[in-house]
Amino acid sequence: MPSVSLLSYDTPIFPTLVDSGSTHCFIISLWLFNGTSNFMITQAVDLLVLFPSTSNVTPFSFYLAPLDSECKLVLGHNWLTHFNLLIDWVLGSIKF
């Protein structure tokens, strides 16, 4: 699972899921709002995402959602099509 850093917050590296089946991008809600979580998505946050392997910084909007504890961030179809990356699914690499 790839990892990214969020420049907007002083947080550790986030385990990230690249999900072409997800229509939008999501971030785990309890990391940003005092541990509380709703099942209804009502908020979004704009974040700067840093990919350590390339040093590329990309701004994007993420919906706050309760995610599995293994995954803190989901990069969805809207993010993938916006940046039109080259993804090697076998090697697990992403190229901008």
Image (cartoon, rainbow, N blue to C red):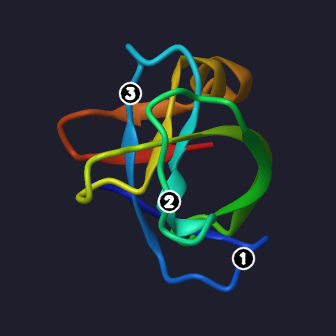
Res 9 label:
1
**In front: mark 2 or mark 1?**
2
Q: Please give the name of the residue rendered at 57% of the width and 31% of the height, measured from the top-left corner.
A: 85
Q: Please give the name of the residue rendered at 63% of the width and 43% of the height, measured from the top-left corner.
A: 96
Amino acid found under the numbered disc labelled 1:
Tyr
Amino acid found under the numbered disc labelled 3:
Asp
Res 48 label:
none
Res 19 label:
3
Nearest the eye: 46 or 81: 46
Amino acid found under the numbered disc labelled 2:
Thr
Q: Please give the name of the residue rendered at 57% of the width and 72% of the height, measured from the top-left corner.
A: 34
Q: Position of residue 4 (x, y in %)?
A: 52, 64
Secondary structure state at the residue bearing disc 1: loop
Mark with earlier residue (1, 3)? 1
77 left or right of 91 in image: right
Q: Please give the name of the residue rendered at 47% of the width and 50% of the height, measured from the top-left corner.
A: 37
According to the image, label 2 marks what residue? 36
- Image-quadrant location for residue 60: top right
Q: Position of residue 93 (x, y in %)?
A: 36, 48
The residue carrying pointer 3 sits among few (fewer than 14), some (14 to 19) or many (20 or more) residues within 10 Å by Cα, namely some
Nearest the eye: 70 or 4: 70
- Image-quadrant location for residue 5: bottom right
Reply above or below: 27 against 57.
above
Q: Position of residue 27 (x, y in %)?
A: 54, 48
Nearest the eye: 63 or 95: 63
The residue carrying pointer 1 sits among few (fewer than 14), some (14 to 19) or many (20 or more) residues within 10 Å by Cα, namely few
The residue carrying pointer 2 sits among few (fewer than 14), some (14 to 19) or many (20 or more) residues within 10 Å by Cα, namely few
Mark with earlier residue (2, 1)? 1
Cα distance in 3D space between marks 2 and 3: 25 Å
Nearest the eye: 28 or 74: 28
Disc 1 to disc 3: CB gap under 8 Å: no
